[in-house]
Image (cartoon, grey):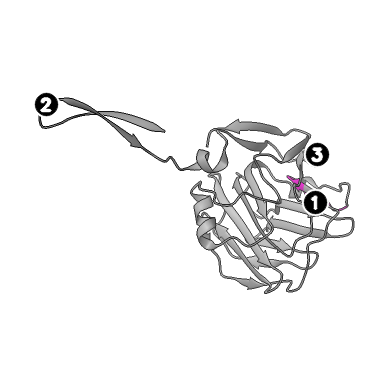
């Protein structure tokens, strides 16, 4: 963007000065003036969104998964935040457990993270995992949990479905209302690598340095089912 400024010199004459500003920020990095937001207004076993990934086949030896989440659900209740289900396994599931911890399932028993309780105000959440080291960590609003070692040598397998709002107990469904998500989810992005701590902190602040290559919220296809609203909101 160019800004034109008129400046007066010592002789009293007006001169023309051009100043160039490089604008950075959310719009510059994202290339979009509005962000889609998925609103699930009430508990059900029928409302969800299916995401169709850019990366095919969906096979991962490392990943960074990020999203923005707000919910008024409280108390001893499980909440599914992200579900990737293949025919026989919960291949990649992210939960808020009854005791408030977050848990990651990669086809087996979970790893748990003690984090601050979610609330009705939006939180930026990122999850990282690397098969080579087994290192897994959670970031809440740019702040990192301690690192856990989980599923070293594992691979997230292809051939599944990505669901927001429900936990599929079978490949084609098997949803339970008492585990459903109620609230607002947006900015769900995924990379097939572990982003640096600084890059994740910048994402929290609305500055994206690397385009997501597995799930890109700006372009990913969203298939709605049930009482779901997808709206555009200003960043």
Q: Secondary structure at mark 3?
A: loop
Residue 168 located left or right of residue 135: right
Evaluate if marks 3 and 2 touch, with contact meaning CB atoms under 8 Å apart: no
For the stretch drawn in magenta, what is the main secondary structure?
A: loop
- Report whether residue 100 is seen: no
Bin the neighbour count of mark 1 within 10 Å (Cα to Cα): few under 14, some 14-19, many 20 and up.
few
> Residue placed at 70% from the left, 37% from the top?
42
Looking at marks 3 and 2 on the same chain, the residue that comes earlier in the sequence is marked by 2
Which range of residues does the magenta coloring cover?
A: 163-170
Q: CA distance from mark 1 to mark 2?
A: 66 Å
Residue 91 located left or right of residue 128: right
Q: Position of residue 190 (x, y in %)?
A: 67, 52
- Residue 12 numbered mark, or none: 2
Number of numbered discs overlaid on the protein picture: 3
Bin the neighbour count of mark 3 within 10 Å (Cα to Cα): few under 14, some 14-19, many 20 and up.
some
* Relative depth, front residue between 106 and 193: 193
């Amino acid at each position: 963007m160019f800004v034109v400024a008129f400046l007066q010199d010592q002789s009293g004459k007006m001169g023309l000065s051009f100043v160039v500003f490089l604008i950075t920020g959310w719009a510059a990095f994202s290339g979009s003036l509005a962000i889609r937001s998925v609103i699930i207004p009430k508990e059900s076993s029928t409302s969800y969104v299916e995401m169709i990934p850019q990366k095919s086949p969906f096979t991962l030896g490392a990943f960074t998964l990020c999203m923005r989440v707000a919910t008024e659900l409280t108390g001893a209740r499980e909440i599914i935040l992200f579900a990737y289900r293949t025919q026989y396994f919960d291949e990649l599931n992210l939960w808020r457990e009854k005791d408030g911890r977050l848990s990651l399932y990669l086809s087996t028993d979970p790893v748990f993270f003690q984090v601050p309780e979610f609330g009705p105000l939006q939180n930026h959440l990122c999850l990282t995992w690397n098969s080579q080291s087994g290192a897994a960590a959670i970031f809440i609003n740019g702040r990192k949990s301690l690192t856990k070692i989980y599923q070293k040598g594992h691979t997230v397998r292809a051939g599944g479905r990505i669901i927001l709002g429900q936990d599929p107990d079978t490949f084609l469904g098997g949803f339970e209302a008492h585990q459903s998500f109620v609230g607002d989810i947006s900015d769900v992005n995924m990379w097939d690598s572990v982003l640096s701590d600084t890059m994740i902190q910048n994402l929290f602040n609305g500055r994206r340095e690397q385009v997501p290559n597995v799930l890109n919220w700006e372009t990913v296809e969203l298939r709605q089912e049930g009482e779901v609203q997808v709206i555009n909101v200003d960043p």
